[in-house]
Image (cartoon, grey):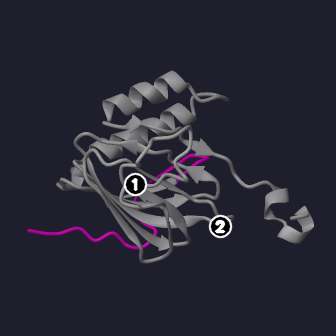
């Protein structure tokens, strides 16, 4: 019996304007868990969501991400960034070496609020759900000038994603990248 070794930088890559995903281990390799390396660009926010059957694990390799993995005391508005749990849990700013485990039913999200890309290892069970999700989202994003919101919603339903707050991609502008003093803050 043989295992699988995937050298750095290797694996099938799917690239959109909002993410770069490299498949590392998949159902095709005989794995029940899908493993991906994901580059999260500045301004990307996956939006809070849940899964009824999926489990996920995120490990920050480089950069910084804001992470959420709890049921808030109140699911407020259109944004998860200020959510708090009844026990006082709140969003965590996580650097290299931090990890997040998400059991089924747990609201969770990540966002890159910095002006530098972040890189993470992402594992999802069961495979191949997230493999197919990433493949379809590339097709939807590349289908035209605008993203078909109905196609995204139908795809999420097929792959056990129950969106709570919207996915957003708002790259920093040049004005955002200037020092605070230059912006009059």
**Considering the numbered disc 2 on the image, is that residue within a helix, a strand or a loop?**
loop
As helix, strand or loop, the secondary structure at mark 1 comes to loop
Q: Mark 2 and mark 1 in contact? Answer it, CB < 8 Å.
A: no
Left/right placement of residue 46 relative to residue 58 reads right
Direction from residue 80 to residue 172 in the image, left or right: right
Looking at the image, is mark 2 or mark 1 nearer the viewer?
1
Q: Position of residue 65 (x, y in %)?
A: 53, 64
Magenta stretch contains residue 9: yes
Residue 12 in view in this figure: no
C-alpha separation, residue under disc 2 versus residue under disc 1: 29 Å
The residue at the point 84 percent across, 66 percent down is: 178
From the top left corner, tell me how far across and down residue 124 is, in percent.
29, 53
Quadrant (top left/top right/bottom left/bottom right) for the N terminus: bottom left
> Outermost residue, bottom direction?
97
Left or right of residue 27: residue 178: right
Give percent across and percent down for residue 82.
55, 53
**Disc 1 designates what residue?**
85
22 with respect to 80 (left or right): left
Where are the magenta residues, as a range? 1-19
User: Residue 161, position in %: x, y?
Assistant: 36, 37
On the question of residue 115 being in view, the answer is yes
Write down the quadrant of residue 154 in the picture: top left
Which residue occupies the extreme left position in the image?
Answer: 1
Judge whether 131 appears above or below 91 on screen: above
Q: Does the segment drawn in magenta span residue 31?
A: no
Residue at image location 30% in from the left, 42% down from the top: 51
Picture mark count: 2
**Residue 116: mark:** 2
Rendered-image quadrant of the C terminus: bottom right
Q: Nearer the viewer, residue 126 or 141?
A: 126
- Earlier sequence position, callout 2 versus callout 1: 1
């Amino acid at each position: 019996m043989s295992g699988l070794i995937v050298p750095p930088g290797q694996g099938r890559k799917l690239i959109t304007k909002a993410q770069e995903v490299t498949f590392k281990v998949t159902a095709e390799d005989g794995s029940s868990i899908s493993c991906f390396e994901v580059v999260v660009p500045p301004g990307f926010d996956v939006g809070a969501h849940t899964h009824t059957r999926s489990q996920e694990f995120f490990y920050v390799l480089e950069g910084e991400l804001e992470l959420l993995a709890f049921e808030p005391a109140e699911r407020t508005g259109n944004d998860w960034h200020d959510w708090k749990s009844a026990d006082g849990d709140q969003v965590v700013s996580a650097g290299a070496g931090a990890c997040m485990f998400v059991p089924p039913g747990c609201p969770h999200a990540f966002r890159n609020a910095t002006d530098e890309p972040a890189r993470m290892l992402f594992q999802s069970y069961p495979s191949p759900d997230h493999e197919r999700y990433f493949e379809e989202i590339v097709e939807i994003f590349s289908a035209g000038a605008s993203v078909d919101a109905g196609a995204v919603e139908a795809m999420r339903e097929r792959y056990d994603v129950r969106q709570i707050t919207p996915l957003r991609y708002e790259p920093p502008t040049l004005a955002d990248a200037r020092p605070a003093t230059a912006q009059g803050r």
